[in-house]
Image (cartoon, helix red, strand yellow):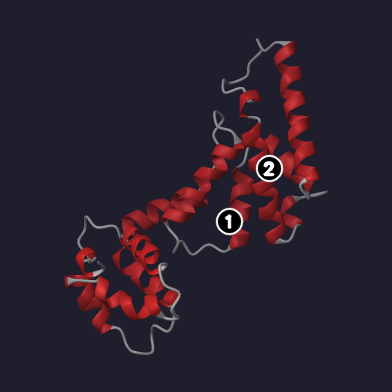
């Protein structure tokens, strides 16, 4: 099964898809070191020749293997594009924070070798969020989100995204202007308070 789906290092092949498929297949067994020993048999042609040039002591774990494999076969252009999407991330005016959070995660998932530390990613997401979202995160942090422990910060982000997703129906997807009614503003304030209450209760 593995040899029937070899990764050959061709331009049209996706190294991330190959790792994902290989990982799923190997999850059928729990034998220690199984993936690392089997991986060379999933490679062909150019990729197989690359694997043979590795020194014996350069790959000691599955993580080592992925860190060596992805930069070699993940195109520089694709890596650069995704790194730019991550570092320049901004929440759009017409999307909820839940949608923005999913988009941000998709960038990091598509480029697992992006090289950014978790603290840097948290800062990037926070600074790219809309002012209202930053305010909610700061309130939930009792100060400033970026002063929190990184793990706590990510938990607050996740809680707010889940809360925001529950109230999508109250989110006004049009750009607000002078014609907004008092009723609309009251609904926005109510939805905001509900999000904040849920976020604080989740801590």
How many marks the image carries: the answer is 2
Q: Residues within 10 Å of mark 2 (few under 14, many from 20)?
A: many
Q: Secondary structure at mark 1?
A: helix
Tell me which residue sits at (36%, 65%) in the image.
25
Extreme-left residue of the structure = 45
Coordinates of residue 22 in the picture (x, y in percent): 34, 65
Q: Residues within 10 Å of mark 1 (few under 14, many from 20)?
A: some
Q: Quadrant of the N terminus?
A: bottom left
Coordinates of residue 104 in the picture (x, y in percent): 52, 47
Tell me the number on the disc at residue 160.
Answer: 2
Coordinates of residue 38 in the picture (x, y in percent): 32, 77
Tell me which residue sits at (37%, 74%) in the image.
68
Q: How far is disc 1 from disc 2 in space, using C-alphas?
A: 17 Å
Residue on which disc 1 sits: 121
Q: Secondary structure at mark 2?
A: helix
Nearest the viewer among 26 and 162 is 26
Q: Which of marks 2 and 1 precedes in the sequence?
A: 1
On screen, 131 above or below 75?
Answer: above
Tell me the number on the disc at residue 106.
Answer: none
Q: Is residue 95 left or right of residue 141?
A: left
Q: Is residue 83 left or right of residue 175?
A: left
């Amino acid at each position: 099964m593995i040899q029937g789906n070899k990764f050959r290092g061709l331009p049209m092949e996706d190294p991330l898809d190959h790792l994902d498929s290989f990982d799923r297949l190997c999850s059928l067994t729990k034998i220690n070191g199984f993936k690392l020993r089997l991986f060379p048999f999933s490679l062909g042609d150019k990729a197989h020749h690359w694997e043979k040039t590795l020194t014996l002591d350069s790959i000691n774990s599955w993580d080592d293997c992925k860190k060596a494999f992805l930069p070699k076969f993940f195109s520089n252009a694709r890596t650069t594009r995704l790194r730019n999407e991550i570092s320049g991330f901004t929440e759009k005016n017409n999307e909820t924070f839940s949608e923005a959070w999913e988009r941000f995660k998709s960038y990091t998932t598509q480029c697992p070798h992006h090289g950014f530390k978790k603290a840097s990613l948290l800062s990037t997401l926070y600074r790219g969020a809309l002012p209202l979202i930053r305010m909610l995160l700061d309130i939930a942090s009792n100060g400033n989100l970026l002063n929190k422990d990184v793990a706590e910060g990510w938990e607050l982000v996740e809680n707010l995204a889940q809360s925001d997703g529950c109230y999508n129906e109250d989110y006004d997807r049009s750009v607000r202007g002078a014609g907004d009614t008092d009723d609309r503003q009251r609904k926005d304030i109510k939805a905001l308070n509900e999000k904040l209450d849920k976020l604080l209760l989740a801590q």
